[in-house]
Amino acid sequence: MNMAILKLGWDQFCQHYHTSDSRLLRWTQFCLLFFLLTLSMTSSSIRHYLDNNLQQLLGADIVISQYEPLSIKQNQYLKSKITSVSLNQQLNITLTNNHLYQEVQLKVVDNNYPIQGNLKVSDVLSVESYATKQSPASGEIWVGTRLFTSLNLKINQLLEVGGARLIVKKIVHHEPDRLLEGHSVAMRAMINHVDLINLKNHQVQINDRTKFRYLISANQQNIKEILSWAKETIPSAQLVHKKGKHPLALFWQRVENFIGIGSVLLFLMATIAIDQAGRRQIINQKRFIALCMSMGLNRGGCISINFVQWFCSFITLLLPAFILAYFAQLLAVSQMQSLFIGMEVHWDFITVLKTVLILFLLLLTFQIPQWIEIFQVSISQLFKPTHKNKNVIYRVCFSILSIAILTVYYSDNALLTSMILGSLVATIFLLMALTWLVLTLAEKTTQGAMGLVPFSFYMMKQRLLSKTMQILGVGLCATLLLFTLSLLKDFSQTMNNYMRQHDGNLIISKAQKHHIDALQIWSKETNSKIKQLKPFVFSQLVKINGKTLAQHSDKPSDSMATLIKPIRMHWTDKIPDNNSVVSGLWWQAPENNWHQISVESEIMTDMDLKLGDELTFTIDSTEYEFIVTSSHEFKSGNGSMTFWFQVPSSARENIIATSLYMGSMELSKKAWGSLSKLWQEYPSLRLTSVKELADSFDKTLGVIIKLVSIFSFMIILMALLVIWACVQGYEADEKIKNGLLLSFGQTKLACLKLSIFEWLITALIASSGAIFGTWIAGSLIYQSQFALNYVPDPIWIMSTLFISVLIVCLVGLLSNKKNLNVSIKKLLV
Amino acid sequence: MSNTISLANVGHHFKLNKQKISLFDNLTMKISDKHSYTIVGPSGVGKSSLLLILAGLETPTSGSVSFECNDSTLSNLALRQKSGFIFQQFHLLPELDALNNIALPLKLKGDKLALDKALFWLKQVGLEYRSKHKPSELSGGEQQRVAIARAFVTEPSFVFADEPTGNLDEQTAIEITELMFSCCKVNQTGLVVVTHSQELSSRADYCYQMSKGKVELVENTIGSVTGVAV
């Protein structure tokens, strides 16, 4: 490429810089660059934070976590390989202080704790903490800062915990292995393992879903051997080590991919905007190229000039997009610090480069049809212009290719991706069909009538293709926005839905038999009611068809993240009232073959299971095999308590484990005040008010609302660009049309009425398509991804429809203002 | 029925970069729907402005313009509804075929016989076999024929044409000129044409020569005009 070409390309870029088409294209590309850069840079900061925390705050060289203690043989093996070990146990209890109560994650430590790093503690809440290598002595309880405040505790105060009396000795500010325990905002307390034995009522025993964490120090060689040994011998254990991934990494990767899929939709809207805006540009470019060719330039040179012009446009956007994305990243990180405490901004050049390259590739792919068109230009077109546009098929194919590249880059969940894209494709087809149907029918029906309305339908029908593109662009924007706002609204109302379905105001999340007996007595005393009770055992899925979970699938998924921990397994002979069978056959009682299991349908899809698969569960240190004979799904209307795994009642007789119960209660007003008395007696009884759940939910929801709001803002911005492009692309045609109408004796008011009517029809069709698209997306995605039932609210939908029609009309008219302000004079020489 | 457009002491100027540019002053003339008129002159002299004033699309800076139908005064809007326009660049709608381009003004008025009338006029201009063709499929001359048919389909009292043969070759220009004038004669329509073409201007009943602010009647077979140079 010689200097002349470069200079010419640069000149073309400068000359077109201030044209409205060029401005529109730049804005669209800028929005995409900004969005993807912000996403990548924020993601990079979070990943760096996670890696950094893993490296520096491990508290051990390797941590083995599981819900059973190691056997004697396993302990012996470990001791032969390690330099030191500390055993922590974690369990959930409820602490009370007078009338105050709080659910707490209790950490039970031995005298070796901490084996690496220091605890940071203080003796008074308001003073600075100091480091210590000591752990709580027998008879002491150390509490976290939030728990100290929540229960209104005092240092040296005596606290009754399941019959044992412990002294509140210190306030814990930092534990070296805190983050490795997993993401939790629960309040915390720490006691010595000696006091665990002394706790009354035996609730805090091994089978009470206690988590056992072995913090190990070892040399590099032994770490590798221990890791291999653990994968073989204790497949259900979680392993965290300095070379591995942070537990939160999976969570963030899923969020990033979800937002990435959203960017696919933004990109789709951008392609419509670029396509519309490019209509006029391509005519000018072709004329320029034809002129250059008539002056002796070859085709390759012509494409090079156009490429340089396009490249200059892309490059000049990079710096401003990067600067703005950097500040956006600062804002995002500050917002996320409530979830990732201590997170800071981290600069990663490779990530930025990768993002820029992928977007460059996408926009380049989308530009190819235009270059094909330019390549076909000939000098004869200067004498005899051709108006046929044979390149529609190229534009569609390359647009799909661009979107496919982006989808592949970000997709990690085939189910979610196919749901989103499937909804989108359905919406596109519906919009096209609706447009064609409405305009054709309306034109036919009003053919013989007089006035502006029939004329308007007639003209819209004549411009069917351009009108369809316009409606498609606006409709997709409206669909995305409506779905996002709908999800936000329903997410916020989730607890109300939960309360309506839940049948009670108190959840029994875990209780043993004697707890139930006590609850029954207590509920009679307090005039409360136990609404439902379902038994379960904690079981951990360890193998699928003989392979460990990691061997079965290495893709991150929410189901996988849950299945690496013990989950509840229920037994029943009858299909529960709130379930329905999706595939396979439910067993009939009495069932001799107790090795059958029914799996929740979404888990089947997410974990790629099918009927006939063999699942191996560990229940109380014993392995049990089951064959998948059916799958079930949740059916609303009969309580919300449902289980991922259900087995026949005959299986329970063959499983050696302690039965636990979950259910719901309706408490009378006076009953709430006596809950603390119940907990003092039974501290491991897990009861949660629906309101408490809502409160803990609100914090996470707050962050999600912010994220969704930002995403909605991007959609609105893109929608405005699409409308602007749709108007811009047909500006010249509109001006001629309006000028002609004036020459036929129509008034400017008539032209305005025509324009209003056209935008009204556009907005109505687009909004109707959006409602349908949202309904499809909601029906598909809500239950599977967010465990919400999609119940569209007709009033909300109609109000949103009305507002969106109004806004689209207004924006369309405002954009069209120049075209309305025309006179016949403009048509003259 | 008799329609006239009268200009009384009309003058027109505009400002460009704070400089006043006068086109003409104290112009008095009368245009009747019974005759044809051409306005000739070099580029930039104000021919189109005069055309616009006559068509009621621009207000002169001084003087008055009135439109009368059987001695009743009409508004600008009423005059436009009785007028047709022919443009140098044709300005046919690209998405409509020839027939529908012609039918457009009638459809706008809700005329149920729009397509029949359009077909009649398509035959008048000799293009009935091209009714389904879009403007991109027609030559320049054919497009201008369609534009002429469109201008006459509403049976206007006046047709205003701005350089109608400006984009056409000589032979086609002659044909178009012939077509325009014959349509006007047959339909008793007043024709006002702005043109550079001496050939075209010689066909009209009246020819007004504009040059350096002067408007002079070059040929006068009926009536009179007074025009003053600035």
Image: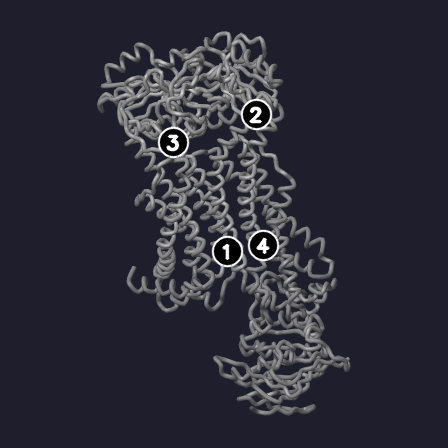
Amino acid type, label 2: Phe
For marks 1 and 4, the one nearer the N-term is 1
For marks 2 and 1, the one nearer the N-term is 1
The answer to whether residue A129 is seen in the rendering is yes
Q: Position of residue A512 (x, y in %)?
A: 50, 13
Tell me the residue at 41%/17% (across/down): A210
- The reply to whether the C-beta atoms of the residues labelled 2 and 3 are less than 8 Å apart is no
> Are callouts 2 and 1 both on one chain?
yes
Depicted A683 relative to depicted B208: above or below: above
Disc 3: CA contacts within 10 A as few (<14), some (14-19) or many (>=20):
some
- Mark whose residue sits in front, 1 or 3: 3
- Mark whose residue sits in front, 2 or 1: 2
Q: Which mark is residue A634?
A: 2
* Image quadrant in which the C terminus of chain A is located: bottom right
Q: Distance of mark 4 from mark 3, alpha carbons?
A: 47 Å
In this picture, residue B218 sits left or right of residue A612:
right
Give the structural element (helix, strand or loop) at label 3: helix
Q: Distance of mark 2 from mark 3, alpha carbons?
A: 29 Å
Q: Distance of mark 2 from mark 1, alpha carbons?
A: 45 Å
Q: Where is mark 4, residue-wise?
A: A467
> Are callouts 1 and 3 both on one chain?
yes
Q: Where is mark 3, residue-wise?
A: A248
Dividing the picture into quadrants, the one containing residue A412 is top left
Amino acid type, label 3: Leu
Q: Position of residue A249 (x, y in %)?
A: 37, 33
* Image quadrant in which the N terminus of chain A is located: bottom left
Amino acid type, label 4: Lys
Q: Which mark is residue A276?
A: 1
